[in-house]
Image: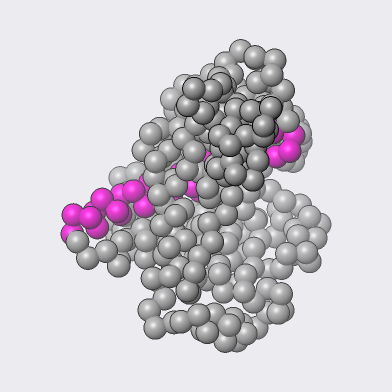
Amino acid sequence: MAQIEVGKDQMMLCLKNNYHNVPDIYTTSAPFFVLGHEFGHIVAHPGKDTKYWTTGSKELPVEGFQQFKWMNAISDILVNWTVMTATTVIDAAAKESMKKQMVDGWKASSLIRRCNTIEGYNAHRLRLKEKASGFTDNRYQPKGGLSGQYDNAEVGNKYKPTADTPFYQKHMGHGRGEQYYPPISYAVAEKLPEDWRKIKMLKDVGGLKKDRKYKVERTRTFDSRENTSEFEPISEFLIDGTWVSARYCEGVCPQCGNVCESLWGRWWGYVSPDEREAEIAQRGTWVYLLIQMYAYQWAMVYSSIFKMGSNPLIRATGEKFLDLIASDMDKVMRGN
C-alpha cells in the first residue's frame, strides 16, 4: 500500500480524557497499537505494491463488493502479527518495548468497552448538563477558557466550533466522543461499583430474561480461571448464581446505562440466525473472517507472547485455546 487513513474512531482512542477507570498502560498503548496497525499495512507486505491489492483482490472467489473487504481482513491478520512481534523493527531494545506496547494496545483496542451510540451520546450530554453525581466534565478546555469551549470557535459563541477548530477537540468529552471503560471482567476482579459490572441479556437463558439487566458476580476464562484482571477473552459470567456464556450478554455503560460493548463482544456476541443472514446480505461474508481472526490471533498470542494462565508459550497452548473456544465459534457462525 502507498497510503493509510486513520478514521475518527481511531483518533478518539488517542484522547485520554475519554477513558474511565482504564489502567494507564492501556490508555496509552491502545492508540499506539491502532496507529501502528495502520502504518503496518504499508510495511507488512514485502514485494506487494499497490497494484497487488487490485489484482489480488479480484482473484478472491467472492462477490465484487466484498473482495476488498476480504483482502483487508486477510491483511489485518498479517499486519497484526507483524506489529505485535515488531518484525520490521531492527533495534533490539526498541523491538522489546514495541512488542509490549503493541500487545497491550491490541488487547485494549479489542476489549475496552465503548459507549458510542446516539442514545449514549445524548445520555452523557444530558447527565453532564444536569451535573449528575460522578460525572466530571472531561471536554476540551482551551487555555484561559472554560471546559467545553473550543479554540478558533465561532465569534460570539465559544462553545460552537468552526472549520478551523482542531478536529480532536470536537470529540473530547461526554456527549462529544465515545467514552471508554474496562472489560466487565476487570471491573469484577477490581471490585468496581455495581454499575460497572452490569450486562444486558441478549436472549433468554435459563431464568435470565432477554433485555433485562443483571450484575455479574464472577467471570471465567476459556481455560477456567476465575476473576482475572487481565484483558483477555472471557467465556462465562456468573449471574444470579448461574454460569452463562458471556456471548449471550451485552455490556452496559457504567455511566449512562446504554449499550457499551467491546469489539470482541460485537463480533462474538449473540446474533439470531435471521439477524445474521440479514447482516450477511447487507455486508457480506467477510464478517466471518474477522470473527475467526480474533480467535486465531489470541491463539497466536497465547502461543508466543502472552501466557494463558500457567500454560507455556508454545504452539500447543494456542491449539488448546482453539479447542476451548471451538464450541463458541460454532455457535457464533450458526447464530445459536
Specify whether residue 113 is painted magenta: yes
Magenta segment, which residues?
92-121
292 or 88: nearer the viewer: 88
**x 62%, y 70%: residue:** 69
**x 62%, y 59%: residue:** 330
Q: Is residue 124 visible?
A: yes
Classify residue 54 as left or right of residue 228.
right
| Percent position of residue 77, x then y | 47, 66
Classify residue 308 as left or right of residue 31.
left
**x 56%, y 69%: residue:** 72
| Percent position of residue 122, x then y | 73, 30
Classify residue 244 as left or right of residue 283.
left
| Percent position of residue 210, x then y | 76, 36
| Percent position of residue 293, x then y | 52, 62
**x 72%, y 51%: residue:** 271
Seen in the picture, residue 53 relative to 106 is either above or below; the reply is below
Seen in the picture, residue 220 relative to 106 is either above or below; the reply is above
Coloured how?
Answer: one colour
Seen in the picture, residue 324 relative to 89 is either above or below; the reply is above
> Which image quadrant is residue 321 in?
bottom left
